[in-house]
Amino acid sequence: MKNSMNMTEGSIFRNLIYFAIPILIGNIFQQLYNIADTAIIGNILGDKSLAAVGASTPVYGLLIGFSGGLTNGFAVVIARHFGAKNESSLKKAVALTYLLSGIIAFVVTVSSLLALHPLMKALKTPSDIIEQTESYMRIIIIFSAVTIAYNMLSGMMRAVGNSKAPLLFLVISTFVNIGLDFLFVKGFGMGVAGAAYATVISQGLSVVLCIVYAVRKCGFLVFRKSELVLDRPMLSDLLTTGLSMGLMFAIVSVGSVILQSAVNSFGTSTVTAHTAGRKIDEMFMLPLSTIAMSASTFVSQNYGAGKMDRVKQGIRCSIIIAQVWSIISLLIVVLLRVYLIRWITGTSDSEIIAAASKYLIWNVPFFFILNVLLVLRTSLQGVGRKLVPVSGSIVEFAFKIIAVTVLAPKLGYFGVCISEPIIWAVCAVIVLADYMVFLKKTKLTPVGKEKAAAI
């Protein structure tokens, strides 16, 4: 297993940083998929086409959030068995992950295609952009199995500490994506559909590269037929962990879909502004989600090895790193937000710039709370505490409904801007309370290596 990384030994800070940097760079390139689409569409096709892609973002997030959460949940289980050095269980978990991911891909594709038009109508998508929005999303959905396959393969590699290979494949596919964007959108005049095709083709390339690498360099991530055993405890662990993470991301994404309906009701200019604000916001969130992902792998491996002191120290170290990035993000947004908005949208419309700026000013300062929420939520999943992170997501969902029904009608777009910071604060209190319970329980009943691996 030379193409893996054992995070149960050595410096905690070095392990986290060494593992996180390739993930961060990979996430940046993955965001470039979306940013390239946004910038090219905004500058070549105009504000309406940009709004059409923006209106699809929450639906796309729901699709990717649920499937990505499931495959990340599977990876958590694989990481535990890797940390416990139980190769037999590791191979069983890998084989079942392939099987479950295939089933998920089929269900997600069929159900999403059936729900697309009713959902876009229910979200009050403006009539002048709904056709473009559905055209873009239909292509993404049809090829969603490609995205799920990449999430599964890269998740398994990261579970065993290999974050470099997925990075390399993302870098290659991102440059392919940008080149295809220009070719399809500008050269062939395919409109927003061209951007969608560019995305799925480049993601397909990532999948092919992952498969070739796994076969040649990571043989333990390729299973034999004899290893595909319907082991009930293993299947239950994979499903409960995967579903809890999938539901956690899906509930958050459904809330975002509902929140998008409030944004859509304010008209195309606000949709465009919100799209730009979200893209920039998500760009600065990337290091936070990366740190949380690294914490999850670190915690899962050490929990599997029964090293509880390293679990707690890893969580604390992750939060400190995330707080430093929160300070940097705030400084950049305060000083450069107008330039970033203009670069993303290609617009000089003062109304769009002002609305996008408002969104950023009311979100980024609360990253200090968000990073605690993200690290604790993924870490609790890593130690097998599946209920409270999902419960926190349900609370987030409920507050987004309140934002749509109460805050947005009374406060306008400002109500949308302040909804997520309020949600982050409430959810952070919930997961922090559960983490305190976890700390108390580990003091009373230390978790041994075998028990931790079994969980």
Image (cartoon, rainbow, N blue to C red):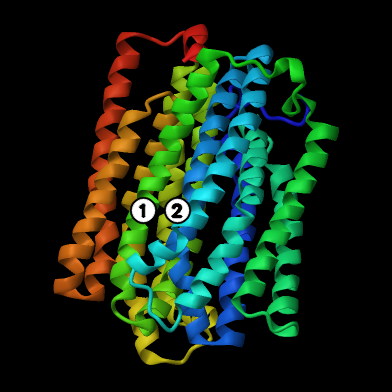
Front residue (pair 294, 100) = 100
Tell me how far mark 1 sits from mark 2, CA to CA. 6 Å
Q: Which residue is mark 2?
A: 62
Mark 1 nearby-residue class (10 Å; few <14, some 14–19, many ≥20): many
Would residue 106 be found to the left or right of residue 181 on screen?
A: left
CB within 8 Å, label 1 to label 2? yes
Dot 1 falls on a residue whose secondary structure is helix
Q: Quadrant of residue 176?
A: bottom right
Q: Which quadrant would residue 326 be assigned to in this image?
A: bottom left
Which residue corresponds to mark 1?
A: 254
361 lies left or right of 149: left
Quick check: 384 left or right of 185? left
**Residue drawn at the location 25% of the way across and 64% of the way down:** 418
Left or right? Give the position of 388 relative to 151: left
Quadrant holding the N terminus: top right
Which amino acid lies under the numbered mark 1 shown in the image of this protein? Answer: Val
Q: Position of residue 100 (x, y in %)?
A: 58, 31
Q: Is residue 122 visible?
A: yes
Amino acid type, label 2: Leu
300 up-or-down from 444: above or below: below
- Residue plotted at (24% across, 45% down): 395
Viewer-proximal residue, 325 or 189? 189
x, y (%) of residue 52?
48, 76
- The percent position of residue 101, horizontal first and vertical second, equals 60, 36
